[in-house]
Each structure stands twice: as C-alpha cells, then as structure tokens.
Image (cartoon, grey):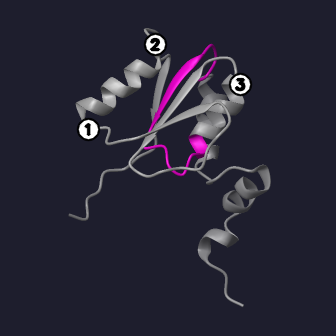
Amino acid sequence: MKYSKDKRDIFYRRAKELGYRARSAFKLLQIDKAFNLLDGVINAVDLCAAPGSWSQVLSNRIGPNNGRIVAVDLQEMSPIDGVTQLQGDITRRSTADAIISLFEGNLADIVVCDGAPDVTG
C-alpha cells in the first residue's frame, strides 16, 4: 500500500494524535515557545483560519472562557470550543466591520494569519 507524503510526515501524524486539524499548529506553538507570543493575550483574531489548527492553539492557550477568539475564512469550518467563526473575505470592509463588532468595543491583542495569496491566477 502506498501512503501519501502527508501521512508519512511526523508532524502530520503528531498533529492528528494531539487532535489538531493540521500540522501547521506546530508553527504557532514553536513561535509562542520561542517568543512568548501569546503571553497575556485575551482577545485574538485568526485570519485565513481554515482548517482551524491555529484557532485550536489559541483556544487551548487562551482558554475557551477567558477571552474572545475570532476565526475568519472564506471557507466554512467545523466548530472549535471558545472560537467565534466568521465566514467572510478579509479584503472586504464588511468583514473587518463584522470582526470589530464581535469584540464589543475591545481591541484584539493579536492578529495571526497563516494564509498565502492565491498566485495561480
């Protein structure tokens, strides 16, 4: 039986074992470990959030009831405890307004994004 490259990758397998949706969770965990990026963060925005592994890290790190995490993506995502999901285009003013309204007058402590531009035309 032939396996895809992803299934042979140690980070892919470890992410699945730990319940993360994608191996990209380890990027945010590594950055946080090196720079204490998420220390003191209560309110966070995750842009280009699908499939949601960074939102999962934020929820685990901040705690589902300690602040507000807003995950934004063009695609619909499965729910994540402690994360408010917003389906929208981050280049549209209406999406920015929706994000701002979800914070009810508070500011985000951090905005993270693991998205890449569509360069295929």
Q: CA distance from mark 2 to mark 3?
A: 19 Å
Q: Is residue 94 above or below residue 41?
A: below
Q: Check disc 1 and report its element: helix, strand or loop.
A: loop
Q: Is residue 57 above or below residue 63?
A: below
Residue 16, x across and y down, in percent = 73, 57
In the foreground, 13 or 95: 95
Mark 3 in CB contact with mark 1 (< 8 angstroms): no
Which mark is drawn over residue 104? Answer: 2
In the foreground, 37 or 85: 85
Residue that sits furthest to the right in the current view: 17
Which mark is drawn over residue 91? Answer: 1
Which residue is label 3 attached to?
63
Residue 110 left/right relative to 29: left
Residue that sits furthest to the left in the current view: 121
Residue 17, x across and y down, in percent = 79, 56
Q: Check disc 3 and report its element: helix, strand or loop.
A: loop
Q: Nearer the viewer, mark 2 or mark 3?
A: 2
